[in-house]
Amino acid sequence: MLSVILGLAWPTMLEQLMQTAVQYIDTAMVGTLGTQATAAVGATTTVNWLIQSTISALSVGFLSFIARACGAGDREAARRASGQAVLAVLVTGSFFTVVTLSLSSRVPVWMRVDPAIRELTADYFFIIYTPILLRTAMIIFGTLLRAVGDTRTPMKVGAAVNGINIVLNFLLIYPTRTVSGFFGEFTVYGAGLGVLGAAAASAVAFAIGGVLITLALWRHPVISPKGQKITPDMKILRPCLKVAFPNMLQRFGTSLGYVAFASMINSLGEVSTAAHTIANTVESAFYIPGFGMQTAAATLAGNAYGAGDAKRMRSLASMFIPLEIGLMVVSGGALFLSAPGLVRIFSTHEEVIRLGTTVLRMVALSEPFYGFSIIIEGMMQGVGKTREPFLYNITGMWLVRIAGTFVCTQIWNGGLVSAWGCMIAHNLLLFALFFICYRRGSWNPLHGQEEN
């Protein structure tokens, strides 16, 4: 079982590691342009989370349905679900294209971005969301492939996207310049577009990734939508949406909370915004083990539930939990020790470095607790139990993180450290709620059937 878990998890971990490496490179490249450039790129990051998480929530419904269908040996149902996923991509991607492009000039205002960088932020947002239809395909079709145990194809597509993004960043961000190397000096041509060059590089890379993942799904021997109808099929959509809707509300509600959270941080000034942006980028690399294992947990739990195998379901939990906590202890320790050096990669501003280091070391201590929550939530997604995670996450986000941050920053005039303290309190509450859920067995629809 351990080899199966790692076989599913490592390609997802590697994919996320590559995505995070590109985030690091993007932030570092833009950071050389100054604090204003870093703030302009980071000011709408939480809006990006809001949109992407809503799309990802929809994909969870398909993951649960397909994983259970494969566990039950019903490949035809899995293929029909793939056809309905194509419809979901077309509808959802078109909707977000209209919404994001039409509201791009208003988003920086709503996010309380410094007036000096609002126009730049709006232009960045518009460019990066131009290919949102193809980005939607990357998210949903990638999840479909993972649901049938194919985690390597999304990893390969992700590697291609990241490579394209880095090369285009190098060519589009900076102007033509002379570079010294082992073979002497030579001229490197560049467009000199700055922040907008970074946006264009990401947009082109996402568009190519969407095309590649669509072709991969179309050719897949198990889950190809070829020959399936893309008109609404409620026998497929109803159970998918039943799982997806609470998860969508959860992700929308929590992501909207991230937007409110970032908006309050943006109001603290340019230095706090830059430190928050950099800390988020650095932190994301250290959650890779957790979220990589979550994908494997969701897929294998769905398979076990589809097969009606209660013993396997229980054994999965007993293996995933200590493995996940161990990984997060290691990653949290590494984050605590390396925080100052990592923040310095992205900024030379001493106040930004000090603030970023402080909040990263705070959150590093809470990572093992958050890792437990990630695994239990992943297994619940795989078996289609998304109502409880919705309630837990919404409660923690709005009653602890947002309300606490509002009081600390807007009433008590606290700074970034107090805001991140509220975020950590939110993570600890999630641990407590998911631990109670685990101990009661309510996460497992086959609980109590091990002897049967």
Image: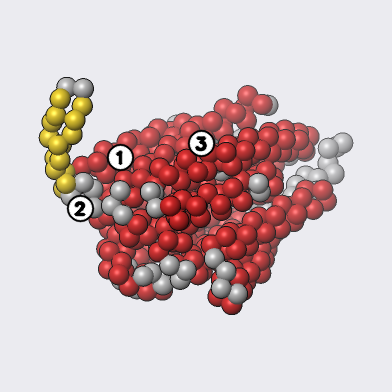
Given the current orientation, which residue lies at the most extreme bottom position?
A: 411
Residue 82 in view of the camera: no
Q: Residue furthest top?
A: 183
Circle 2 sits on which residue? 193
Q: Amino acid at mark 3?
A: Thr
Question: Which quadrant does the C terminus fall into?
Answer: top right
Percent of width and height locating residue 110 = 41, 73
Image: 355 above or below 23: below
Could you tell me which residue is drawn at 57 percent across and 38 percent down? Answer: 337
Q: Earlier in the sequence, mark 3 or mark 1?
A: 3
Q: Is residue 313 left or right of residue 47?
A: right
Give the SS element for disc 1: helix
Residue type highlighted by circle 2: Leu
Horizontal and vertical percent for residue 331? Answer: 59, 37
Check contact, mark 3 vs mark 1: CB within 8 A. Answer: no
- Number of the label disc, if any, that sits on residue 12: 3
Q: Choose between 2 and 67: the one closer to the eye.
A: 2
Residue 196 in view: yes
- The structure residue drawn at horizontal position 51% and vertical position 55%, both measured from the top left corner, is 355
Give the label on residue 166, or none.
Answer: 1
Q: Earlier in the sequence, mark 3 or mark 2?
A: 3
Colour mapping: secondary structure
Residue 2 lies in quadrant: top right
- Specify few, some or many for label 3: CA neighbours under 10 Å numbering under 14, 14-19, or 20 or more: many
